[in-house]
Amino acid sequence: MPIQTYIEAISSALWEEMERDKEVFLLGEDIADYGGAFKVTKGFVDKFGEDRVIDTVLAESAIIGAATGAALVGMRPVAEMQFADFVTCGFNQLVNNTATTHYRWGLPVPMVVRLPAGGNIHGGPFHSRNPEAWFFHQPGLKLVAPSTPYDAKGLMKAAIRDPDPVLYFEYKYLYRRIKGDVPSDDYEVPIGKADLKREGEDATIVTYGPTVHIALDAAKEIANNDGYTIEVLDLRSLMPFDKETILESVKKTNKVFILHEDTVTGGIGGEISAFITEHAFEYLDAPIKRMGSLDTPVPYAPTLEEEFLPNKKKVVQVVKELLEF
Amino acid sequence: MAKSAAPKKNKKKESSFDKPIKKTLSKQKDPLKGVDLSEEKLIQMYKDMLLIRRFEEKAAQMYGLEKIMGFCHLYNGQEAVAVGGNAATREKDYFLTAYRDHGHALVRGISANEVMAELFGKVTGCSRGKGGSMHLFDAEKRMMGGHAIVGGHIPLAAGFAFASKYRAEQDVTVCYFGDAAANQGVFHETLNMAALWKLPVVYVCENNRYGMGTAFERAFAVWDIYERASAYDMPRDVVDGMDIIDVYKKTKEAVDRARNEHTPTFLEARTYRFRGHSMSDPIHGHYRTKEEVEEMKAKDPIVNFGELLKKEDILSDEDLKSMDEEIKKTVNEAIEYAEESEEPPLDDLYTDVYVD
């Protein structure tokens, strides 16, 4: 099976979907001649032409609004936000038009918005955010957040083919750091299904995105040093999230730690925690633990950002507290 | 002595609002000369305007009776803009507007029954009672909403027009919005994009002089709103929105240009609403005078078009009377229909949040 980086897997999915379906087109700032800020769409314009790989003006509201209009009449646009942070400028379109039109009209809105998210690249306050919680709260949107090249490709294909609008969170930190097997055959990773990344008996870490890798490293360290086995559940889809698999794991390990890179208060972890408490309280042997980034804007200075983000050391410490409860 | 930096109280400039509003149709010399509208179509346009007027009058009554809840914005006075524009389009052209949308929905062929039922919040409404007054739509009739965030639908129109062009279809998109919407950032974002992408779209600003209670003279640094399109090198024009023939001619020219040359146009139609902004404010309120309202009512687009049709021997007084009776009957039937329709089932709460 070919090995691809996370970013190559995203590009492959887009490329194959554009070859498969002429109604799929890409739009965004500097995605054609420049190839995108991160080069996800490098070479696309040469293959598919400027009618299908469209350099837009710097106007997120117009980009998302136009994509929504095209989707409402049956096209399958994939809009790129250059950085996830910039979606703020298109917020009205997403939460009012994109998310709610199907409820009133019954027409599908098959579109994808790509959101290069996350920190650890020293981007400072406006180029490092994880804005998923804003949209998690908006009925009508689906949210996916792959952590591996395999999922990046499979979820992108699923997102493009999905009849609902999908926000696709892709992680700048993972782009070229993570490699993995990616089938060259056509496949989808179903939206709404979590992936059990590591089996265990003593506690569950529920996580997604870049912190999946931190959780796996932490679980390995704990296994090596202390002999506990930790289950790591990668949600992959945030809305809908895989309630069944979460409950199965909770019932098995009886201890839960929820981890994400977004800041902790008001983050998705709170909702997952409430869900577990409502549906599996009697299985819990300890209070649910949560960790996210600190409740501050994202700092620039590498020393500050390192302290701001979750890391293996912090995770190991909290999991140990949970195990010792 | 240095001049005070404090802003001087401005001398009131005289408004140019009604400058493009010409002599009423019935007093113009030969306004139908060279206009490619059959008698049949002219009569239909008259009927369309009258249906909207009678519908809105009843909607106001029903609001008073609390049959219609929430927010309700009436189109009385502005009928010529939607009807003249519709006459300039084909059935498959896309139409969309803002929240003052009853007229646009009716003229696109959504039945009075379905519109009234939607206002009543009934399951037989065009949006199954999920949208209400500001969210009327019927995609098959290419009435693409009813949009209740001011200016928020302007980029959707670009999306429809993009799809038409991409698929090499001949359809044009006509997008209406009020004067206040032209101050939203997305107006500028999208007009620039539409010009760059050469989209088959026509943007029509229905300047009814007030964004709620704020006169456009107090909201625009430059009063000729249509001139904003010069920044995007887009063809533009000002239209007498009280004159359905002027609306038709200028919209037709713009629609043809969009269809044949893929060139977008921006039109500003100067028009006037005879009622308050919504049902919550009186006819004139503090922000405009009774005299002003009366003066504009003398330019009533329906009365004047009716006079013209009589002058041209297309319709007689009797014809007008019997049409009015027929339309009033249609509207009364719509009220019965809405009254008798079922409330949406509670199961509908969860349908269509997502496709599956």
Image: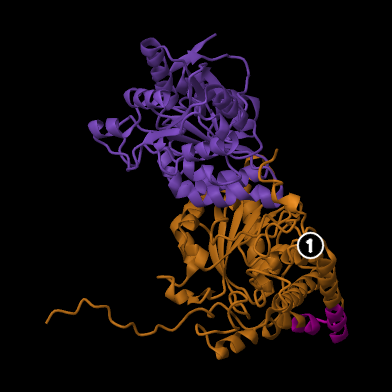
User: For the residue marked with disc 1, what is the amino acid?
Assistant: Glu
Please identify the residue farthest to the left as the structure is shown.
B1
Task: Tell which of B286 and A45 is nearer to you.
Answer: B286
Inspect the magenta stretch and tell me whether residue A136 lies in it: no
Which residues fall within the magenta stretch?
B307-325
Task: Tell which of A312 and B61 is nearer to you.
Answer: A312
Residue at numbered disc 1:
B114
Which chain letter matches label 1? B
Q: In purple, which chain?
A: A
The image shows residue A223, relative to residue B54, as above or below, that is above
Q: In which quarter of the image is the C terminus of chain A?
A: top left
Please identify the residue farthest to the top as the structure is shown.
A1
The image shows residue B203, relative to residue A43, as above or below, that is below
Q: Specify whether residue B14 is in view.
A: yes
Across and down, in percent, residue A244 comes to 62, 29
Q: Colour of chain B?
A: orange
Q: Which residue is drawn at 60% across and 25% down?
A: A248
Q: Which colour scheme is used?
A: by chain
Task: Tell which of B292 and A194 is nearer to you.
Answer: A194
Across and down, in percent, residue A66 comes to 56, 47
Q: Is the magenta stretch mostly helix, strand or loop?
A: helix
Q: Residue at x 43, y 84 (%)?
A: B14
With A90 as the anchor, is B124 left or right in this view? Answer: right
What secondary structure is marked by label 1?
helix
